């Protein structure tokens, strides 16, 4: 007997089916609610609302579980390459050797961007925020590849568009960095790995052959994997809803880049470092910052703490915290901000306010410390998040598209003025 939910409205009982997921998550299917009752639900921020059924990523916020297509994040971060994980998220399974070789080869041979795009960078002001440049450049890819605008979404066009985007986004990200540093653009090199090529385009200079440091390559590979997907978060939901209008992939991903930029979302990794540097500069006791974060009259929040889903530890934060220790030790970097972060975590996790609300360090709390140790400027941190998140966004967009999901169009409860007549300006 399938489970149902009953709602009584104006004395009338209405029954709705319950959907059960493969991990036994339950949802009340209200797709017929308005038609049968005239009522809608109201749920600002969609804290209790599922927008779709997805087979890509599973989160268990209470137990700190994160799996991509069934594979535990701990295993993937330790054993997989970012390209394997990208393939897994986009196509549904880990690739065999032949599939991975084809995927790597295709990506490698699409890393160049049209020379005209370099002129776009020349037009950006110096110190333009790289996220503003990245979202603009990703959207403009659709103008160079009009076949991507095909609403019928021919599968070959889609795959080519996906490979082009995976291939070109590191090139565009590195160009944004070089623009702001006033340094010459470095062209991709086909004999390097995806991560190694990004490092070459970021830190290489024409005068010498860049040597990929395996410690940094391994750290970035792990960080990209940890950021690769996270079910229906703000930016992924943005990508899906933009794509639901049959907008092309480039435009949908550009919208996701913009949503990620916000300091409550992916922009938190930049905000965390800025917060830690302020704490270090002011030298005030950590408890005073904790007290400010608890004070409702104070807009200060402990950036990098709290999560919509994880009300226990964020498994990614645990992995990144250890990676931060390892990478800084391997690179011989002694960053006082890391010590402050650990002390702040200690103080917060012994404070009833944080414990009671399940406010633990999230993925953004420690990632900025590694990026800093790798020599990445703070305003590039969220670009790094976007590079990692790209395959997740693509996989989610592809799933939405293949399932022919309806255009996203939420309803509302109107609270504005009742009908009124137009008044001539002299009588207002
Ligand atoms: C990411 O969704 C995802 O999956 C996102 C992400 C991904 O991989 O895509 O995991 C990446 O975005 C991680 C989150 C990065 N953001 C930050 O670190 C910014 C700081 N954190 C918050 O602003 C907040 O915790 C959110 C935005 C992350 C979650 O906010 P919610 O779920 O809307 O929770 P809320 O704002 O309703 O907070 C619940 C309570 C409130 O207090 P009360 O009203 O119960 O008294 O907790 C308090 C909040 O005031 N609170 C905080 C806090 N976060 C929540 N208080 C102080 N400092 C904080 N950081």
Image (spheres, rainbow, N blue to C red):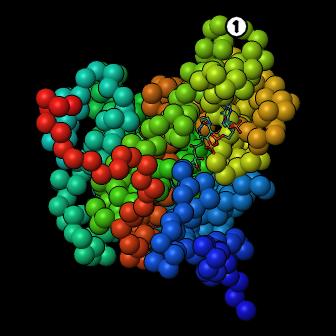
Comparing 179 with 418, the one in front is: 418
Residue 376 is situated, as x and y percent measured from the top left of the image, at: 49, 28
Q: Tag 1's secondary structure?
A: loop
Q: 339 above or below 263?
A: above
- In the picture, the quarter occupied by the C terminus is top left
Residue at the image position 66 percent from the left and 52 percent from the top: 309
Residue farthest to the front, as pictured: 427
Q: 394 above or below 348?
A: below
Residue at the image position 25 percent from the left and 23 percent from the top: 125
Q: 23 above or below 270?
A: below
Q: Is residue 336 left or right of residue 257?
A: right
Rendered image quadrant of residue 96:
bottom right
Q: Is residue 309 visible?
A: yes
Q: Within 8 Å of ligand 1, the CB of disc 1?
A: no
Circle 1 residue:
283
Residue 322 is situated, as x and y percent measured from the top left of the image, at: 74, 38
Comparing 283 with 163, the one in front is: 283
Q: Is residue 160 visible?
A: no
Comparing 338 with 303, the one in front is: 303
Residue at the image position 60 percent from the left and 73 percent from the top: 10
Residue 234 is situated, as x and y percent measured from the top left of the image, at: 50, 50
Residue at the image position 41 percent from the left and 73 percent from the top: 405
- In the picture, the quarter occupied by the N terminus is bottom right
Q: Label 1: few (<14), some or many (≥20) within 10 Å? A: few
Residue 242 is situated, as x and y percent measured from the top left of the image, at: 35, 58
């Amino acid at each position: 007997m399938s489970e149902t939910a009953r709602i009584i409205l104006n004395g009338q009982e209405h029954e709705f089916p319950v959907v059960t997921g493969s991990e036994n998550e339950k949802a009340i299917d209200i797709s017929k609610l308005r038609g049968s009752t005239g009522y809608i639900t109201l749920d600002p921020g969609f804290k209790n609302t599922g927008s779709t059924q997805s087979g890509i990523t599973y989160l268990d916020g209470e137990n700190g579980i994160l799996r991509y297509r069934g594979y535990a994040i701990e295993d993937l971060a330790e054993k997989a390459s970012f390209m394997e994980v990208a393939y897994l998220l986009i196509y549904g399974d880990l690739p065999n050797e032949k599939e991975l070789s084809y995927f790597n080869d295709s990506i490698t041979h699409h890393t160049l961007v049209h020379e005209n795009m370099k002129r776009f960078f020349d037009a950006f002001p110096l110190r333009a925020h790289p996220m503003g440049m990245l979202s603009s450049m990703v959207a403009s890819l659709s103008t160079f590849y009009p076949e991507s605008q095909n609403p019928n979404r021919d599968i070959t066009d889609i795959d080519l568009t996906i490979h082009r985007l995976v291939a070109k986004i590191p090139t565009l990200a590195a160009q944004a960095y070089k623009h702001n540093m006033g340094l010459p653009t470095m062209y991709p090199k086909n004999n390097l790995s995806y991560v190694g090529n990004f490092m070459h385009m970021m830190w290489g200079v024409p005068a010498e052959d860049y040597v990929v440091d395996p410690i940094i390559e391994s750290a970035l590979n792990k960080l990209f994997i940890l950021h690769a997907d996270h079910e229906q978060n703000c930016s992924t939901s943005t990508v899906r809803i933009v794509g639901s209008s049959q907008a092309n992939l480039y435009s949908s991903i550009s919208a996701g880049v913009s949503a990620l930029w916000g300091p409550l979302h992916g922009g938190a990794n930049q905000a965390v470092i800025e917060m830690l540097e302020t704490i270090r500069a002011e030298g005030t006791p950590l408890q005073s910052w904790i007290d400010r974060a608890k004070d409702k009259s104070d807009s200060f929040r402990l950036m990098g703490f709290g999560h919509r889903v994880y009300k226990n530890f964020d498994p990614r934060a645990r992995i990144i915290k250890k990676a931060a220790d390892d990478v800084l030790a391997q690179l011989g970097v002694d960053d006082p901000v890391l010590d402050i972060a650990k002390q702040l975590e200690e103080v917060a996790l012994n404070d009833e306010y944080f414990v009671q609300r399940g406010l633990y360090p999230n993925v953004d709390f420690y990632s900025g410390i590694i990026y800093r140790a790798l020599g990445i400027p703070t305003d590039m941190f969220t670009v790094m998040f976007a590079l990692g998140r790209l395959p997740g966004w693509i996989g989610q967009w592809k799933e939405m598209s293949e399932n022919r999901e309806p255009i996203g169009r939420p309803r509302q409860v109107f609270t504005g003025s009742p009908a009124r007549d137009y008044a001539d300006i002299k009588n207002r």
